[in-house]
Structures are given as C-alpha cells and as structure tokens.
Image (cartoon, rainbow, N blue to C red):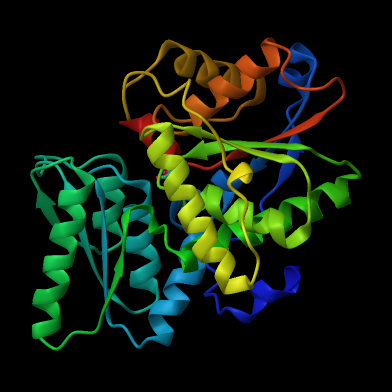
Amino acid sequence: MNRESIKKFPTVSLSLLPTPLHKLENISRETGVNIYCKRDDLSGFAFGGNKTRKLDFLIADAISKKANTLIAVGAIQSNFCRMAAAAGKVSGLDVHLVLGGEKPDKPTGNLLLSYLFGANIHFVDSNDWNILEREGKQLAEIFKTQGKNVYRLPIGGSTPIGALGYAAAFIEILDDCNRLGITTNTIIHTSSSSGTQAGLIVGKKLTGWQGKIIGMGVAKTEKQLSKEVFDLAHDTGKLLHVSIDKRDVILDNSYMGSAYGVRTAACESAIKSFAEKEGIVLDNVYTGKAAAGLLDYAKRGLFSPNENVIFIHTGGTVEIFE
Ligand SMILES: Cc1ncc(COP(=O)(O)O)c(C=O)c1O
C-alpha cells in the first residue's frame, strides 16, 4: 500500500487544503533552530483547526451510511463540537451536541459559534469524558427508537475514519516540504484525544519517513494517552494495511501543567512569543502548551544544528476571546 491508498475513502472536502507551511523567521533566528509552522489553524471551515480534517472523512462516512442525525460530545468550549456542528449542518444533518457544564446565561466562544451553526445543545453537569460519552450513547438510543439514523462522534472525532484526516495531512506536509525544498526529521504538535497523532503516525508508516512525531500531551497521563494513540494508530493502519510500531508513539506531558485546561506560565509566555514575534495566535488549552514544549526543546539544545522542525498549529484560537 502506498500514499494513494487514502484516496479510496470518501471525503466532503470542507477544509481548505493545503494549509500553509511557512518558516517562523523571528523565532527561528532567536532560537537558532529552523522552525516551520503548519497552519492548520487556517484550515478555513468554521473558524478552522485540526478537526476539520477529521470531519472531512467522518461526515462523508456518515453520509455514506445514510445518517440524518449527528451526535458529538465534548467540553462546553469544545473546538471539535463547534466544527462538528457546522460540518453536520452544512451537510444536511440534524446536529446534537452533548456538552459538559452548566448552560451559561450568555454563550461565548465555541459555544456561541455552536449555536450560530445551528446545533441543538444538551448540557450535562459533568466534566468527566466517560460520563459525556455515556450520555451521548443514551441520546443516540432515544433517537433510534424515534426512527432516526444516528452517526455518533466520540470526543475529538478520534475514530480510525477521523484519524485518516491526519494520515492525509502527514502526506501533505511532506509535499509542502518538497515544494519548499526542505527536509524535516521532527514534527511537534498537541496531543489530546489521540486522533491527530495516530493519523500522523499512520502517514509516517505509509510513506516510510524516518523522523520523529512528538505529541505534547495536554489532557491525560502519558501512559493512558500512549496506549490510546497506539491502539487508534493500529486500527487506522489496518484500514490502509500498514502496521504500527510502539516506538513510533512519542509523547511528552512535561508542558501540560497540573491538569487539562489549567493555565501555565510557560504556555502564556509561548503565546506571547508567537503573537509578538510572528503575529500568530495560539490558545491556552492546546497549542500554547505544545509551543511551550517546542521553545523549551530549542532552548535546551534538543534539536540538531540546522534541523528543520515543523510545529503543527492545530487551531483552538477561539479560546483566546473567552
Ligand atoms: C486546538 C486543538 N489542538 C489539538 C487538539 C488535539 O487533537 P487530538 O484530540 O486529535 O489529539 C485539539 C483537540 O481537541 C484541539 O482542539
């Protein structure tokens, strides 16, 4: 199997691709490392971010299964649910979001956008992802008894079909590098529900690329996330007939801070650096923490001299307005 094998899976092509890959000139000069940014924050659809790539495949799958109702679950400010709301709605599906938290008097950020995109929202008073998944399943059962054909999306859209979006993104990155006349051995990005990293690893295996994909964990223990990434990469790899090696899963949780969503000084400083030096906006939950790791690796001399490092900006910038 080769890189063409992904093309046999249908997509709805909501993302505006390819997203740009460009050098961060000021940060590269300052750190002494050639840092390039893959701008998946500019994937275009519904404010952009990494989830549009997963939804391109997931919504096409829902349509092929003749679904008429989409259920997505997540935190009250979930980036994924915001994009799932828009992707489902424009594709003619009735969208229901199961969100953790209390209904606020005045919606802001991603919640405001989810309403704007026409989603029906069900609030569940819990931040436990297992409880949200359970509520999503129960809602799906109720809808099924009403004769609806439901397509259920787990947290972050991290299924093998969703992860194909990042296997394709990996190939796009290698094509970008070819166009720019560079090679890279290191890709760094935020890892949370495992779909982005699992997809990238599958892309690596499809192409035979030998570099490192480093996921900066922001939500779970390294042990839990590395198992989830491996399992999902394995299942996604099966769709494309590639096998995954445990050594391909590289995670670093050092920049998460005390918990998911809790701000850290290093993250705030990375957000400021990207804003002031590159005019790029990061967020406090995902990309700012991964960028803190990237800048710290550069400071500690963990990259080889003259290496080209790629940082994937996975979006999430709506958070900054909260
Ligand atoms: C902005 C942003 N970056 C990165 C991630 C992590 O992606 P994944 O859940 O595929 O690991 C998320 C997931 O919610 C996100 O919203």
Whereabouts is ligand 1, in terms of quadrant?
Answer: top left
The residue at the point 76 percent across, 70 percent down is 2
- Considering the image in quadrants, where does the N terminus appear? bottom right
**Residue shown at 32% from the left, 62% from the top:** 85
The image quarter in which residue 84 lies? bottom left
Q: Position of residue 256 (x, y in %)?
A: 42, 24
Query: Against 74, is 189 above or below?
Result: above
Which residue is outermost to the right?
Answer: 181
Q: Nearer the viewer, residue 233 or 85?
A: 233
In the displayed structure image, the side of residue 321 where residue 165 appears, left or right: right
Residue 15 seen anywhere in this rendered image of the structure: no
Q: Nearer the viewer, residue 212 or 33?
A: 212
How many marks overall? 0
Q: Quadrant of the C terminus?
A: top left
Outermost residue, front side: 246
Relative to 154, residue 217 above or below:
above
Q: Residue at image x 35%, y 19%?
A: 263
Q: How far across and down, in percent of the image, does residue 293 sit?
A: 56, 22
Instruction: Please state which of residues 43 and 221 is positioned toward the viewer in this rendering.
Output: 221
Q: Is residue 182 left or right of residue 20?
A: right
Instruction: Determine whether, in the image, residue 160 is placed left or right of residue 156.
Output: right
Compared with 235, 194 (above or below) is above
Residue 263 or residue 232, whichever sits in front: 232
Which quadrant would residue 138 be assigned to in this image? bottom left
- Image x and y of residue 72, in percent: 28, 61
Q: Name the spot of residue 225 as percent of width and height, x first.
A: 42, 41
Residue 66: tell me if it is visible: yes
Report the side of 310 relative to 249 (left or right).
right
